[in-house]
Image (spheres, rainbow, N blue to C red):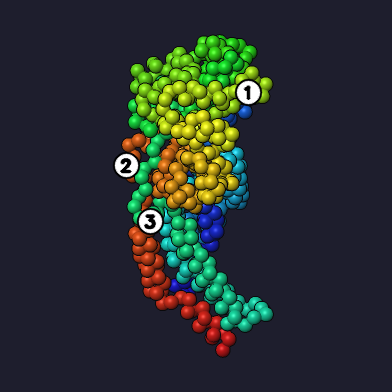
Amino acid sequence: MTDSNWFYRKKGKKWILIFLILCVNLLIIEAILFDIEPYWGDMNYYLGEFIGWEGNYALLLAIFIGIPAIYGGILFILNLRKLILTDKSKPHFLHKILAVGLLIFFNTLLGALIYLFGEESILVVSLIENISVFIYLGLSIGLFILLYPLIGYIQRLLKQSIKTPVSPRTKAIIIISCLIIGYGVGLSLPFLLRPVNIISGDLPSKPKIIAHRGASHLAPENTLIAAELAVNLSVAGWEIDVQISRDGVPFLMHDDTLKRTTNVSAEFPGRENEPACNFTWAELRRLDAGSWFVEKDPYRAIAKGILTPNQIKKFYNVPIPSLEEAVNFTRDHGLILDVDFKGVPDWHPYYTTYFNICLNYLKSAGIDTNIWIATGNRYYLNITRIEAPNMITALSIEVSDPLPVNEFLAMEYDMINVHNSLSYDVIRAYSTAGIPINAWTVDSIARFSQLWCANVTYIVTNEPHKFVGLMYPNWYMHIEIYVLFWVVIYFTGLSYVFLLKKPLGAITNNAQKENG
């Protein structure tokens, strides 16, 4: 029996492979879930609203995934040990059914979550891309290690006396061609799908940090206390959401209703689901917009010990700020103000004058060059260019249908405002043309690093504390080093093949003998 036949003596290999795939697959899903940990608070809130009961659903999901991952790992180890000792592994049929069922269920669940996440599904893609070098490395090593067993399998296949319309030599050529193509594609992936962290030339400048709704994962969002915390982190600016009260006062609020971020249920029972813009300014000012953050700790900032007791005390009884207060705060601290206009419904008394009222408040601060009018509403942008030409007009674009560079330049707006899932090719096209890019909302260090390498100008984040002290991307590599790395890997792999006495030649020789 030849050396290659050891691989074929072993029975039950496919189930051991399935158990390994189950374990690794679920660990990858688990890694994805923990990588998006900054978004757990929002996930828990919306799932709680849907189910009708508040809970840490993200953590429960992590446990739910972790148990079968451990199960798959145990099955793999036990059956591999049995295979090594006895040349045979025969898992119980229930384990087989359960393993396949779990693979199907959890990958279907992952697909559903990616679909529901919409643009945020880039988090999954970016995590995979962030570890893609290790994936490619594992794939390359696996391809070289498996080459010899594959050759042995092909030799056995060619020896089988199965009638085919082609000669043994032609059949060997077809099989070798398929093998070469498969290996060629597999070994080309590091260059066909090169990570954005592989850069040409110098590392781009670090993106400037804009605190989303203030430091909204560290303090009650859209409040001055959140802005103060962001200032202490040395951010470049902050982003706010602006609505207008029923009596014409612009104020800061993201949600359509007040129930998530205020005590509206206690102060105005029965009005929890009423639009925020239907309250008067006096009513809005009565609300506590901070205590909910301490009571729920939605992003675990308190549990993690990020906040001091003195900081936490300041969150109680925080009022909803007016736009005027936000603008004055911005001016006094020399910040950029990224303004997101939430608009008002057509029944609102200030429906037609909402934007003009907001613009007048912004103009009154005298810091036009530090104010961004960030919107996809070109009417608002065009008014701004007329009424406040020194303000920054930031056109919000769709990720799925980005404007060509020439078309954007013809509009004469100042900046692109876009979700962080915009493709790298489009980002590079804009940055090469000198167009500043503001990408929102980035809470992962891996994603921040990728966009840094892609030369994004500004990053909007809920967690500025993660990035202000970051001196370099979490990893990056110059293209020359990257190419050299793979040259070494492939040279080593080819040396392995050569030491195995050119197994590809064995197929042709075998076919020639049978044909002769």
Callout 3: 10 Å neighbours few (<14), some, many (20+)?
few
User: Does 134 appear above or below 218?
Assistant: below
Report which residue position mark 3 lands on. 200
Callout 1: 10 Å neighbours few (<14), some, many (20+)?
some
Q: Which mark is residue 351?
A: 1
Report which residue position mark 2 lands on. 471
Mark pair 3, 1: CA separation: 50 Å
- Element at badge 2? loop
- Element at badge 3? loop
Q: Residue at x 51, y 78 (%)?
A: 507
Q: Quadrant of residue 276?
A: top right
Q: Is residue 212 left or right of residue 98?
A: left
Mark pair 3, 2: CA separation: 19 Å
Q: Is residue 390 visible?
A: yes
Residue farthest toward the bottom in the current orientation of the protein: 516
Q: Residue at x 50, y 83 (%)?
A: 509
Q: Residue 202: horizontal and vertical position, in percent?
A: 34, 52
